[in-house]
Image (spheres, rainbow, N blue to C red):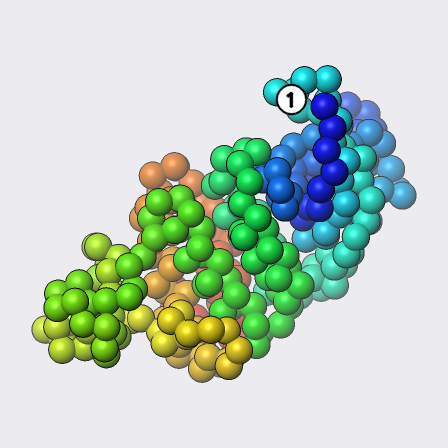
Amino acid sequence: MDWSDRGIVIGLRKHGETSVILEAMTEAHGRHLGVVRAGRSRSMQPTLQPGNSVNLVWRARLEEHMGVFNVEADRLRAGRLMASPMALQGLHWLAALLRLLPERDPHAGLFAMAEAIADHFDEAALAPELVVRFELAILAELGFGLDLDSCAATGSRENLVYVSPKSGRAVSGNAGAPWADRMLILPEFVSREAGVQPPAAELEAGLRLTAHFLRRDLFEPRGLAEAMASRDAFAREALRASGGLART
């Protein structure tokens, strides 16, 4: 059995004296593990850093085996990203999100989004918005997508400014006004195409919105609430850089 694919390095652990087990998010084969022989060598270490994009060849005698990766560098961005506290926390968080996906389950769309985030993790003008959009996509992919197209109370598609923290559905300004202090804010940027940088207040609202549902629906039920620490640290750094208040 063998295949070739592109991947993003999301984790490593030692294997024997000289090898490592590489965890990568691949374009066509999902999150996948494999042994990299001599992966602890000086020549391989710069390539096998979280956040780097690599070209992979996987081989195994049987499909259910862990198998062996041959790895070649593609886009080595880890050195640059590790110099940024925001990007470093973001890389930890990206790995935590990708580990929610079943192993070997293809998610080509999420791979493309993850690679775009990795390209811009050290850019405060882009990273927070990209992360919020990716988090919404992860929630949807795992069966907890938010319904932000129409008001839960009236069916209207106009003036959608809130999200119910219970149902994950949008609520219009008029319908939600009596419970405004209990609602989450729906930032405008999540309903439009990326392109115009959202103001800091919208980014803060977006990060608070997705944090609520990620914690409640994905991380706490799996006993992984501590993984949110890197997400909170990323949000603080990102909002500080963009002028937000960092309340997530």
Q: Position of residue 120 (x, y in %)?
A: 64, 67
Residue 183's quadrant in the figure?
bottom left
Q: Is residue 181 visible?
A: no
Against 217, is 234 above or below? Answer: below
Residue 176's quadrant in the figure?
bottom left
Q: Position of residue 162 (x, y in %)?
A: 24, 70
Q: Quadrant of the N terminus?
A: top right
Q: Is residue 178 visible?
A: yes
Extreme top residue here? 61
63 or 101, which is in the foreground?
Answer: 63
Against 91, is 42 above or below? Answer: above
Q: Residue at x 12, y 72 (%)?
A: 175
Is 240 placed left or right of 166 in the picture? right
Is 240 placed left or right of 207 in the picture? right
Q: Quadrant of the C terminus?
A: bottom left
Q: Secondary structure at mark 1?
A: loop
Q: Residue at x 54, y 52 (%)?
A: 109
Q: Position of residue 143 (x, y in %)?
A: 35, 45
Q: Residue at x 52, y 65 (%)?
A: 130
Against 167, is 208 above or below? Answer: below
Q: Residue at x 72, y 33 (%)?
A: 3
Is 2 placed left or right of 126 in the picture? right
Q: Residues within 10 Å of mark 1 (few under 14, many from 20)?
A: few
Q: Which residue is mark 1?
A: 63
Extreme left residue here? 178
Extreme right residue here? 43
- Amino acid on which disc 1 is placed: Glu
Residue 153's quadrant in the figure?
bottom left
Q: Position of residue 173 (x, y in %)?
A: 18, 77
Q: How many marks?
A: 1
